[in-house]
Image (tube, grey):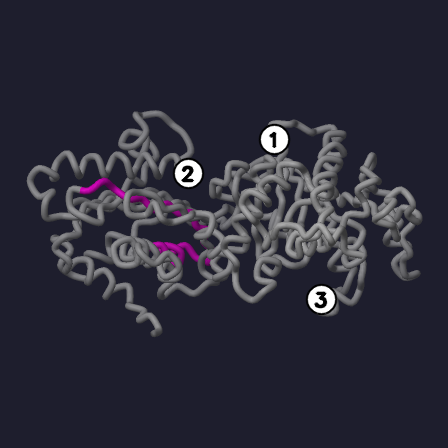
Amino acid sequence: MEREILSTNRKALRINLNDSIYGTIAEIGGGQEVARNFFQAGGASGTVAKSISAYDKQFSDHLYNENQGGRYVSEDRLLKMLHTEYLELIQLLSEKTGQQHRFFAFADTVTTLNFKKDNEAHGWLGVRFQLKPGFSANEVVMHVRLLETDTLLQQNTLGILGVNLIFACFYHYDTPNTFLQSLLDNISRDRIEITMIRMGGRELDYVDNRLLAVQLVKNGMARAIMFDRHGNVSEPADMLYKKNVLAFRGSFRPITYVGFDMLKTSYSLFKRDEDYRKESTLALCEITMHNLLAKGELDERDFLARVDLLNGMGQHVMVSSISEYYKLVSYFSTFQIKNLRIVMGIPDFLHVLNTAYYTNLRGGILEALGKLFTENMKLYVYPTISSVSIDDPTKGDFLLTSENLPLPEDLTDLYKYLKKNRKILDIPNVKKEWLYINSRRVLRMIQEGILGWEKMVPKYIETQIKEKKLFGFIQPDKSKYRID
């Protein structure tokens, strides 16, 4: 049955008329509209114990940061707001009304467009709330980018989003995907992008935040989401801030020795840059939503297996809905990063240079390459062997690199220009003995019980696949030794 979408006013009124829901609304900066929606709906005296707006930075520091400065529009400031407001609520009211009320504290800290409209409009929102009187609190935290070009429109959108978030916490907490979709009720998707969301608490411990995050991309609510090397959902702007970024796209189903070598050797090449700093360099393994939906539906176990294995190898992970590489560069360009390096093998590199992929662009391949090769971007190309024998990987044909690729004559001059300016670089010191490994072949061997795939993946990957029976693993049939 199709879900009924209530108006913002009806959502606020329904919460106001629920005698058990009672709490605080605290708003910093550009977002001052959430409390107003509850007051305008009527009956707010039974819901809003306190509303507060801290527009001045010194007041914000005094209320939430022990008179110390810091970043105002940040997750840290939001969490301090939630802690302060919820603690005050419990201390003042729990003894008197704690058995009849489910307490909540809503907070947001937001920067909308400035007068010159040259800043990044974004914000953090969160709710700390009880689902049963007297029980411990649950928490939902999210980050959004505001896409409208008018401050008043952004403020109105924030007011709607805040009501949607509070409503979802009490009425959709047990259906995570409905929870997500309801956040954009009465908000078109060109007005806002949700870049991160995280749930936790007694009644929400069943939620895997990685699955919640990937649903943002699947539902078109975010272009990309990111996990750190420990599997924690991370806000992209915070994760990428002033970083050198090395991005490697793949299926990672599973990551093989050749994929691992691509990461290792490309990182070594990156280290040669003059402004390389280990602490400010981030490698990202990117999986596209198109790849995850190859079978039509998202296989949650398969997705989690890929993330777990990459995290186990110490890698950060990104999932995106971005197909074209030049659009991937444009995405990264929206963040304050230092340098960007994209790693790809020869097959993908040939696709990048194929004019047939750019017929939708008025400027064709010239426009695409102009968007791809921005000032701070270089392409790292991993070589391949034209043909090899699995029986003897050393007896392959010649090594294909960016230096000896056959190219159409009309691309030759442009290609020479990019090479001369070191925008396209071959990755040196690769493990030639691993170039015969084909990830699709490895997956087939795993799924069909054919021996030999074990020597094509890192030991950790082999162990995890066998122990957890990942990617359709079945015990090998010793009568089968390989796929030709």
Q: Nearer the viewer, mark 2 or mark 1?
A: 1
Tell me the distance, in whole angstroms, between the alpha carbons under discs 3 and 1.
35 Å
- Identify the mark at residue 280; answer none if there is no mark: 1
Q: Residue furthest left?
A: 96
Which part of the image, by quadrant, shows the C terminus? Answer: bottom right
In the image, the segment drawn in magenta is 135-159
Give the percent coordinates (x, y) of residue 27: 30, 44
Give the percent coordinates (x, y) of residue 390: 83, 49
Q: Secondary structure at mark 2?
A: loop
Taking the spot 66% from the left edge, 57% from the top edge, the residue there is: 448
Tell me the distance, in whole angstroms, between the alpha carbons under discs 2 and 3.
38 Å
Q: Which residue is mark 2?
A: 74
Q: Which residue is mark 3?
A: 361
Give the percent coordinates (x, y) of residue 183: 36, 58
- Identify the mark at residue 351; answer none if there is no mark: none
Question: Is disc 3 in contact with disc 1, using a CB cutoff of under 8 Å?
Answer: no
Residue 90, quarter of the rendered image: top left
At label 3, which amino acid type do we have? Leu
Q: Secondary structure at mark 1?
A: helix
Residue 162 to residue 141: above or below:
below
Q: Which callout, 2 or 3, points at the residue further toward the start of the chain?
A: 2
At label 2, which amino acid type do we have? Ser
Is 137 magenta? The answer is: yes
Is 250 magenta? The answer is: no
Tell me the distance, in whole angstroms, between the alpha carbons under discs 2 and 1.
20 Å
Q: Residues within 10 Å of mark 1 (few under 14, many from 20)?
A: some
Residue 418 to residue 298: above or below:
above
